[in-house]
Amino acid sequence: MNATPKALEAEYAELAIQTQQETQALATETTLLNPRFYTTDFDEMDRIDVTPVRAEWDKLLDQMRSDPNKGHFKKNAEWDADWDGMEPKLKREFIDFLVSSCTAEFSGCVLYKEMKRRGNNPDICELFNFMARDEARHAGFINDALREAGVAVNLGFLTKAKKYTYFRPKFIYYATYLSEKIGYARYITIFRHLEANPDQRFHPIFKWFREWCNDEFSHGEAFALLMRTDPKLTQSFANKLWIRFFLTAVYSTMYVRDHARPEFHKALGVDIEWYDQEVFRKTSTIARQVFPVELDIDHKRWLPNLRRMRDAFGLMDEGKKQGGLAGWIKAKRGAVIAAATFVALYTIPVIHREPPKNVRLEPAY
């Protein structure tokens, strides 16, 4: 039976676009799945000596200095956004995607700018100045898209309201390297898919993804070089365990987060599980440049445990919404299942690799 106009109106009202306040709350919220703001031991980072990678370092910095994407993040005649014609559920999930992406980009900008501000090492300060510049452009461009929908994020407020997580420098390297490289893999996979299927491009921002993701790639290259300045960062037994931890955490977080946006991926015309495995595969191949261990994403325990992790987070979310004692018990049960599932993922045997002598790569997808 077809819904009446009044019923449709009620449904659209219920699923209406999030208000400015709700969007700001979404960007400010700190959860296991949301992008975080980080702080670290800036003095330790300022003492980095790039002499062991000087030749590759200078080439990378020359490339960043030339600023190849200086004029890229500007709207042109190809910008044909239609927010009013977007189905409400898709609009809600797309806004969630953009807010999360904007927060992640701005998080990098804040961290890199602080390193540049506090540092005295000319090599390190120049690098982080360029990366802060790029991330500011990315965040600003996404926020312009959100502004058209009436839900832009107040980035200035975000720096004061968002909670900061302290990470030791080596954890910053692992986490940020993976964030930048997986960002490249995500953007280029979407770009190539929509290049072949332009009818599924429901918003123009995807047209900007190719050059954009090359910025992400070069930022990852910088962190690969930083890790190569000290062999212990990737070769000691303890640090190999930490690398394995960050790989597992980043991949499983992406899987859970993506499955929370079914309408977004349906509109793009991609199966979420296929897309995530494709991104994991690209990221794992790229990360061989510096990481001596690789997750076995084809292992028989891999996908079943990712699905179990997704269901555990769903249970936690249901419990929080339900409230009361029963809801609290449900949320705690979900948390216990998620923790046990993470252990199950972490203990899947890894693939050991010998990183190449020359660390630098160029985007190839």
Image: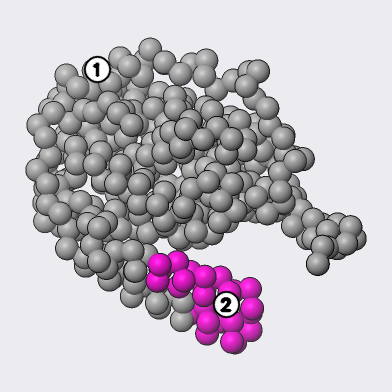
Front one among 260 and 130: 260
Q: Residues within 10 Å of mark 2 (few under 14, many from 20)?
A: many
In the image, farthest residue toward the bottom? 325
Q: Where is residue 347 shown, x and y percent of the image?
A: 21, 67
- The C terminus is located in which quarter? top left
Residue drawn where x is 23% and y is 22% of the image: 57
Circle 1 is placed at which residue position? 59
Which amino acid type corresponds to the residue marked 1 in the rendered image? Lys
Q: In this rendering, is residue 253 above or below 226? A: below
- The N terminus is located in which quarter? bottom right
Residue 122 is left or right of residue 316, and the answer is left
In the image, farthest residue toward the right? 6
Magenta segment includes 309? yes
Please tell me how many numbered marks the rendered image carries: 2
Q: Under tag 2, what secondary structure? A: helix
Res. 142 in view: no
Disc on res. 319: 2
Q: Quadrant of residue 354?
A: top left
Res. 365 in view: yes
Which amino acid type corresponds to the residue marked 2 in the rendered image? Gly
Q: Where is residue 326 shown, x and y percent of the image?
A: 59, 87
Task: Pick whichever of labels 1 and 2 is earlier in the sequence.
Answer: 1
Q: Residues within 10 Å of mark 1 (few under 14, many from 20)?
A: few
Q: Main secondary structure of the magenta part?
A: helix
- In magenta, the rendered stretch is 307-332
Q: Quadrant of residue 139?
A: top right
Residue drawn where x is 86% and y is 57% of the image: 9
Residue drawn where x is 37% and y is 15% of the image: 65
- Inter-mark Cα distance, 1 to 2: 52 Å
Q: Where is residue 43 shown, x and y percent of the image?
A: 30, 38
